């Protein structure tokens, strides 16, 4: 457009006079020069005769001011490389034929390129390898259709990119070598014990080929000595269960090789399961305890054996004289202190430790000097010097001359920094668990109070119908009690003690109820904004888990906005027409309900974005977090069948986007029909019930409610009283309704006693705790039912009629 205007202006100025026309062409040339100079990549237009018609300043700088055409300049540089010369010739022929093309060629190092005199970075030189004598060029040729025979050439230096690719290949090879030849064995097997992977080290220990293991000819049980999995490898050793229920297991076994000889090994592994609990595979690490013990004995008993293994040891080792001066140290020790090992000879070991740990090392050296037995001393903990010096476990042992006199000490350094971090995280996790237990206990007591409030409100409503003067007041009491019950349920969700009950949910209602708790969690200096989408679809999830997701994200946002800010929660319907791929996640087509949690906080560094959902990963200060909040969010969303994505910019905030699949219309309609049927059903019944509840108010309401529905109710205020009544010669009982938590004889214990005499007696447990808390104490039985507190008159009567009607 600009050139057309200049052309039109040139025509007008040409008509006005030569001076104006000259001014126009001068302006046009100035504009073209500015455009050419602005392109950072070297380019050139070459005529059919091979002359340079146009070139930008970047080209002159790239080739040191040489004005010749790019093909000529590059041909000179690759004259001794037939392959590169052939690529360049083919590119020229394509351009003359009217076809665009490009290629990558190598040129001798130090040839063409930027003339700024700066050499490659040291890490780039290290990554060149066999290509250290070459640089790499990207060359492209584009024919100009409107100017036959003319070609637009472009060249660029891609040496750093090639060097980076070389570095990545080398790092990958190092990783494979480390995995295959590590001093421990690695393997993975499926639920049938078939090996999916085994590294070279493990195969060497067993005397078997990798193909024999990985192709299914030999299974896990074939290499484990018979009986070792059930009874433990040695007396006092923990048995090894390869598919333990806790998902992680460790223990000792006797492994046997191809020749039948066995060796003692320690196995530690994680069991990977799918959502249904089915075993997919294991991630297993094997330590050969026999070899480790032999190596330790050799290191203690022989200086010559120590010298042979010294350089290969994965732990840091320093040999010091009686005064603490280093005589020898290995590479692992040098890596720990961040200096070359060879340069530490003659340096006092005390100078490399934090001042607070010097006295502990001196005491350990004195104790080792006086001890002449061959047993390893207990390790001491020490910090190496530096702002973030690693924490190490130091094993100190004396060395002796040929006459038995003290010759010095050998000190082993085991880096325990990561272990200490995990211990701190575990301690923080225990604190959070204690807070959760406290919250669960408070919620239990509140549920008892709320059960009585809601229940007596229901009884009052039976006598005060709409229009009665007291009806509105009673409804206010019941509505506020229900609101309090929601807060208690959210408290149980925070402590993860709620009973999981997936059902159809309206997200708008959930967020509205949760907003009161969120405002208290985030504090007064953070503004909470709620933007609800219209006609939001229904989802199927556990309400407590969904609330846990929102609470965790809100707390995470609060910690990111220490100076205040805005927390925005948005919802909307999203229709995904085609499969979406975001990073490593693939979201299939379908209807989703989107929940976005956005904060205006400090943001997440790009290098941490791929790790934020990892368990125990946290960027907070030590003691300020467990590193489990976001991993819990990820786990709950995936279990619900949803997807969670995150976008963040430093100093600009973070957005978490949660996509939850919407329930089918048929399922929603069926659920609504079921709810209507529940509202219309007759809740009266007949039979004799025993109600066991230590809270007088709850027992009084429940007994009155059930009697009003036609039942004969026997009351007991404790488990002992109920047991006496049930074992006596009273009238037969059709149903036992009992609280779970009671002093002395609790509900589960009462049921076990009664079931010994009445195995067919139906039971309903009522409790403010989660159902899972006591289910594990009872055998799975169809006659055991659960009603969580607080419950209304209708819920209690409905549950009783449902159980008696089975």
Image (cartoon, rainbow, N blue to C red):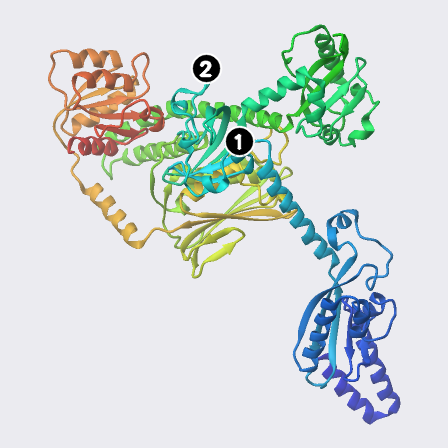
Measured from the top left, where is residue 764 in percent x and y?
24, 26
Q: Quadrant of the N terminus?
A: bottom right
Measured from the top left, where is residue 231 in percent x and y?
39, 20
Measured from the top left, where is residue 33 in percent x and y?
82, 75
Q: How many marks?
A: 2
Residue 518 in view, yes or no: no
Disc 1 is placed on an element classified as helix
- The quarter of the picture where residue 453 lies is top left
**Residue located beneath label 2 in the image:** 236
Q: Nearer the viewer, residue 113 or 473?
A: 113
Q: CA distance from mark 1 to mark 2?
A: 25 Å
Q: Is residue 279 above or below residue 658?
A: above
Q: Nearer the viewer, residue 472 or 776?
A: 776
Q: Which mark is residue 76?
A: none
Q: Is residue 648 above or below residue 74?
A: above
Residue 356 in view, yes or no: yes
Q: Earlier in the sequence, mark 1 or mark 2?
A: 1
| Residue positioned 60% across, 31% down in the render | 183
**Residue located beneath label 1 in the image:** 205
Q: Quadrant of the C terminus?
A: top left
Asked if disc 1 and disc 2 are in contact, CB closer than 8 Å, the reply is: no
| Residue positioned 72% across, 65% down in the render | 105
Query: Of all residues shown, which one is farthest toward the bottom?
Result: 15
């Amino acid at each position: 457009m600009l050139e057309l205007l200049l052309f039109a202006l040139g025509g007008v100025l040409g008509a006005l006079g030569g001076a104006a026309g000259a001014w126009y062409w001068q302006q046009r040339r100035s504009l073209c020069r500015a455009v050419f100079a602005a392109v950072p990549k070297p380019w050139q237009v070459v005529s059919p005769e091979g002359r340079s018609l146009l070139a930008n300043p970047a080209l002159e700088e790239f080739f040191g001011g040489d004005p010749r055409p790019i093909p000529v300049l590059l041909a000179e540089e690759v004259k001794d490389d037939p392959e590169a010369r052939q690529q360049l010739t083919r590119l020229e022929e394509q351009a003359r034929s009217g076809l665009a093309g490009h290629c990558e060629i190598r040129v001798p190092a130090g040839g063409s390129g930027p003339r700024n005199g700066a050499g490659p970075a040291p890490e780039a030189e290290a990554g060149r390898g066999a290509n250290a004598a070459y640089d790499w060029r990207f060359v492209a040729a584009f024919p100009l259709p409107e100017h036959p025979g003319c070609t637009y050439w472009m060249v660029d230096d891609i040496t750093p990119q090639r060097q980076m690719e070389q570095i990545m290949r080398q790092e990958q090879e190092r990783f494979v070598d480390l995995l295959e030849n590590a001093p421990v064995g690695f393997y993975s097997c499926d639920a049938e014990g078939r090996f999916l992977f085994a590294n070279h080290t493990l195969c060497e220990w067993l005397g078997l080929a990798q193909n024999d293991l990985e192709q299914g000819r030999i299974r896990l049980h074939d290499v484990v000595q018979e009986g070792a999995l059930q009874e433990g490898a040695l007396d006092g050793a923990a048995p090894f269960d390869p598919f333990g229920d806790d998902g992680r297991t460790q223990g000792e076994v006797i492994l046997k090789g191809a020749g039948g000889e066995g060796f003692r090994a320690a196995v530690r592994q994680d069991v990977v399961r799918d959502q249904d609990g089915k075993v997919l595979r294991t991630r297993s690490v094997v330590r050969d305890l026999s070899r480790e013990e032999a190596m330790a004995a050799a290191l203690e008993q022989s200086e010559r054996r120590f010298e042979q293994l010294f350089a290969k040891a994965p732990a840091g080792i320093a040999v010091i004289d009686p005064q603490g001066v280093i005589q020898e140290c290995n590479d692992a020790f040098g890596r720990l202190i961040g200096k070359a090992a060879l340069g530490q000879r003659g340096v006092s070991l005390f100078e490399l430790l934090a001042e607070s740990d010097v006295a502990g090392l001196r005491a350990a050296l004195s104790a080792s000097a006086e001890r002449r037995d061959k047993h390893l001393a207990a390790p001491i903990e020490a910090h190496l010097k530096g702002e973030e010096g690693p924490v190490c476990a130091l094993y100190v042992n004396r060395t002796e001359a040929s006459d038995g006199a003290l010759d010095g000490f050998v000190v082993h350094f085991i880096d325990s920094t990561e272990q200490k971090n995990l211990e701190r995280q575990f301690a923080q996790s225990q604190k959070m668990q204690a807070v959760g237990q406290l919250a669960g206990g408070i919620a239990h007591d509140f549920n008892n109070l709320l059960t009585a409030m809601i229940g007596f409100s229901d009884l009052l409503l039976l006598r005060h119908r709409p229009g009665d003067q007291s009806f509105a007041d009673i409804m206010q009491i019941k509505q506020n009690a229900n609101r309090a019950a929601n807060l208690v349920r959210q408290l149980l969700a925070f402590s993860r003690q709620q009973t999981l009950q997936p059902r159809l949910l309206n997200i708008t209602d959930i967020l509205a109820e949760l907003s009161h708790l969120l405002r208290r969690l985030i504090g007064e200096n953070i503004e909470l904004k709620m933007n609800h989408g219209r006609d939001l679809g229904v989802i199927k999830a556990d309400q407590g888990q969904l609330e846990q997701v929102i609470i965790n994200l809100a707390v995470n946002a609060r910690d990111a906005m220490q100076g205040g800010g805005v927390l925005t929660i948005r919802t909307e319907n999203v229709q995904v027409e085609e499969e979406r791929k975001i990073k490593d996640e693939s979201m299939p087509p379908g209807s989703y309900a989107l929940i976005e949690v956005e904060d205006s906080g400090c943001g997440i560094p790009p290098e941490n974005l791929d790790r934020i959902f990892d368990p125990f990963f946290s960027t907070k200060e030590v003691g300020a977090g467990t590193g489990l909040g976001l991993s819990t969010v990820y786990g709950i969303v995936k279990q619900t069948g949803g997807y969670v994505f995150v976008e963040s910019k430093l100093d600009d905030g973070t957005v978490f986007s949660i996509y939850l699949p919407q329930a089918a219309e048929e399922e929603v309609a069926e659920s609504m029909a079921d709810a209507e049927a529940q509202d219309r059903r007759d809740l009266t019944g007949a039979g004799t019930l025993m109600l066991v509840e230590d809270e007088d108010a709850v027992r009084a309401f429940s007994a009155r409610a059930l009697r009003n529905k036609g039942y004969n109710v026997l009351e007991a205020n404790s488990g002992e009283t109920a047991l006496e009544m049930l074992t006596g010669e009273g009238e037969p009982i059709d149903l036992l309704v009992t609280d779970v938590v009671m002093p002395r004889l609790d509900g589960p214990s009462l049921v076990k006693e009664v079931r010994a005499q009445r195995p067919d007696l139906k039971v309903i447990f009522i409790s403010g705790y989660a159902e899972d808390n006591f289910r594990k104490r009872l055998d799975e039985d169809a006659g055991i039912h659960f009603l969580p507190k607080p419950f209304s008159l209708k819920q209690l009567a409905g549950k009783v009629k449902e159980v008696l009607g089975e």
